[in-house]
Amino acid sequence: MSGAMLVWQVDEWKVVQRLESSNYGVRACAFSHGGAQATAMLSDGTLMQWDLDDGKVLRRIAGKGGWIRTCCFSHDTALAISGSFDHSLALWNVADWEAIGLLEDPDCTTSVDSCCFSPDGTQVGSGWMDGSVRVWRVSGGKPALVASHQGHTGSVFCCEFSPDGTTLASGSIDSTVKIWNPADADRSVPQILEGHLAAVRCCSWSPEGDLLLSGSVDRTLRLWLPSTGQQLHVFQNDTPVRSCCFSPDGNLALSGSGDATIQLWLVPSAISLVALKQELEAARLEKTQAEKEAARAKHLAERTVTSAQEAVRVFKAEQAAAPSGVMELAGSRFATVCRWYLVGVVLLWTLRNLRGPALAALKMLLARLRSIPI
C-alpha cells in the first residue's frame, strides 16, 4: 500500500498536493477546522500531521496497540478512534495526540474491522471480525460498552451512524447491510438490506439521513431507502468499490475503487426514484393481469372449439344412423345454431373482460370456428 496522501482541488478534480508519509497505508485522514493542517493515521499505528502551506510534517507519533486495521475522526476532529489486531479500540485527543481511553470487551477475542463516531461525538460504533457490532459511550468519564449486537455471519467491514445518531448501519463480508438501534442493549433484530452479491466494503448516509449508500466487491454502489428497505438504484462500477460517501448537499456520490480511481455519481432524488418504482410496479401488475386474462381467454377458446368439434362428431354419427332426408335439414340448422351459440358465448365473455390479449384470443377462436367442417 502507498503511504502517500493526496490533496484534491474538487472543482477541477486535480491533485494539488502530495503528502508523503511512509510505506504504510493511510487508514484515515482529516483536515483541521481551519483547513491549514492535515492528519493521517497509518496502518502501522503511526500518527502524522502536515502543514498544508508547505507540506512539511509537523509531528509523527508512534502508535499504541499494534497494527491498525481501522480508524476515524470525530466530526469536529477533536477526537480520533483506532481499532487494531489486539482486540481493542484506542481513543485519542487530537490536540496533543494523547491516548485518553481504551475500549475493550473481554467477551471478544477478534480484531476490529471498522469504527465510527456518532455525529455528536459521544458514542463510537465498531464492527468486528466475528460479525458483531458494538456501541460504546466515550463521553462523561471512562468509556463504556453500551450495546453488543450479533447479526452478521462474518467480518463487519464498515459501520456508520445516521446524521441524527439514532441508527447505525453496518456492512459485512456476508453481503448484507444491517441497520441497528445503537442504544438497544437487548440485541433486537436489525433491519436487513439485501441485494449485494459479495462483501459490502463501505456505507454512507445522506445528509438528511433518508438515503443510504453501500459499496461492494460485486462492483456496484447501491442506493437504499432505509425507511422501507427498498433498493432504489444500482450504480455499476468497473471494479470493486472500497469506499463511498455523499456530497454535503446529497446530490452526488463519491466512490473509491480497487483500481485507484475515484468515481463521481449523480444521485437521483428519493421522491423521483420511489415514484418511478411505483410506476414500474403498476406496469408489471397490469402486464401480469393481462397475461392471466389472455390465458383464460385461450383456455375458454380451446374448450369451446373442443365442445363444438364433439357436437359435430355426435351429430355426424346420428346422421349416419338416420334416414338421409330427415337429417340433412336438421344438420344444416344444427350447425348454424351451434356456431352462432358458441360465438355468442365467447363474445359475451370477451366483451366483459376486453383486453388486447383477450381480443387476440377471440379472433383466433372465430378463425378456428369457421374452419370446423360440418
Image: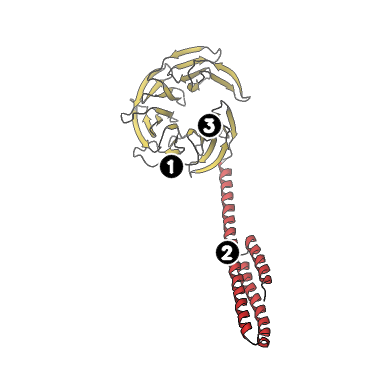
What is the CA distance from the residue labelled 1 to the residue labelled 2?
Answer: 40 Å
Which dot, 1 or 2, sits closer to the camera?
2
Label 3: state its secondary structure. strand
Q: Which residue is drawn at 61% across and 80% down?
A: 317
What is the CA distance from the residue labelled 3 to the residue labelled 1?
Answer: 23 Å
Q: Residue at x 58, y 69 (%)?
A: 303
Label 2: state its secondary structure. helix
Seen from this angle, which residue lies furthest front? 321
Of residues 372 and 194, which is closer to you in this image? Answer: 372
Q: Position of residue 49 (x, y in %)?
A: 48, 16
> Left or right: where does residue 84 sit relative to residue 252?
left
Check disc 3 and give the amino acid type.
Answer: Val
* Picture disc at residue 67: none
Query: Which of the two discs, 1 and 2, labels the residue nearer the N terminus?
Result: 1
Check disc 2 and give the amino acid type.
Answer: Arg
> Taking 357 as reference, is 197 above or below it?
above
* Picture disc at residue 241: 3
> Taking 5 as reference, is 285 above or below it?
below
Seen from this angle, which residue lies furthest left? 106
Residue under pointer 2: 296
Q: Which residue is drawn at 59% across and 55% down?
A: 287
Q: Position of residue 160 (x, y in %)?
A: 45, 32
Which dot, 2 or 3, sits closer to the camera?
2
Q: Where is residue 73 in the image (x, y as percent from the top left)?
A: 45, 24
Residue under pointer 1: 191
- The answer to whether marks 2 and 3 mark residues whose Cβ atoms lie closer than 8 Å is no
